[in-house]
Image: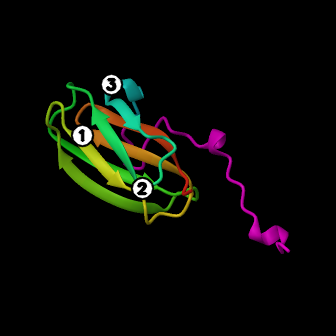
Amino acid sequence: MVEAAIDDLFLYDWAKIDTTEDTTGQEAIDDDLIFSGVFPNPASEYINIYFTNDVTGEIEIVLYNNVGEMILTDIQNAIAGKTYTLQTGTLPAGIYMLSCKTEIGTANKRIMIQHE
């Protein structure tokens, strides 16, 4: 038997989120200018983030949950061909927003975490 009340259910409409500006006021840019790939998506234990060769300098990587709370933040130095691995095995299943801030702008990507 499953018991649930309406106040236990939270639906978040990602379509209403304005991803054209990040929280620092920097304008968001096309994801393809920063990400060359984010795989696997959906993820279980990890997500690999591949950056384009145009990305240089520091990259601020931030992951937000579905209510906009910052789950993690990390700063990496961009190296051509480098893969950044984000461990997701301990995160609850759900939809998250991955935000990467670079010298050329900020790109946002929705990711899903599901555990088998």
The residue depicted at 27 percent of the width and 56 percent of the height is: 74
Q: Residue at x 79, y 71 (%)?
A: 7
* Sequence-first tag of 1 and 3: 3
Q: Is residue 75 left or right of residue 79?
A: right
Q: Magenta includes 14? A: yes
Pick the residue in front: 90 or 15: 90
Cα distance in 3D space between marks 2 and 1: 16 Å
State which tag comes first along the sequence, 2 or 1.
2
Quadrant location, the N terminus = bottom right
Query: At x 21% / y 25%, what residue is drawn?
Result: 54
- Mark 3: which amino acid? Leu
Magenta-tinted stretch: 1-26
Element on which disc 2 rests:
loop
Task: Determine whether label 2 and label 1 are within 8 Å by CB.
Answer: no
Q: Residue at x 17, y 39 (%)?
A: 78
**Closer to viewer: mark 1 or mark 3:** 1
* Placement of the C terminus among the 4 image quadrants: bottom right
Within 10 Å of disc 2 (Cα), the crowding (few <14, some 14-19, many 20+) is some
| Front residue (pair 92, 29) | 92
Label 3, on which residue?
A: 33
- Disc 2 designates what residue? 45
- Nearer-N-terminus badge (3/2): 3
User: Hey, what amino acid is under mark 1?
Assistant: Thr
Image coords of residue 84 (percent x, y): 26, 45
| Residue wearing tag 1 | 83
Rendered image: mark on residue 8: none
Q: CB atoms at circles 1 and 3 under 8 Å apart?
A: no
Q: Residue furthest front?
A: 116
Q: Amino acid at mark 2?
A: Glu
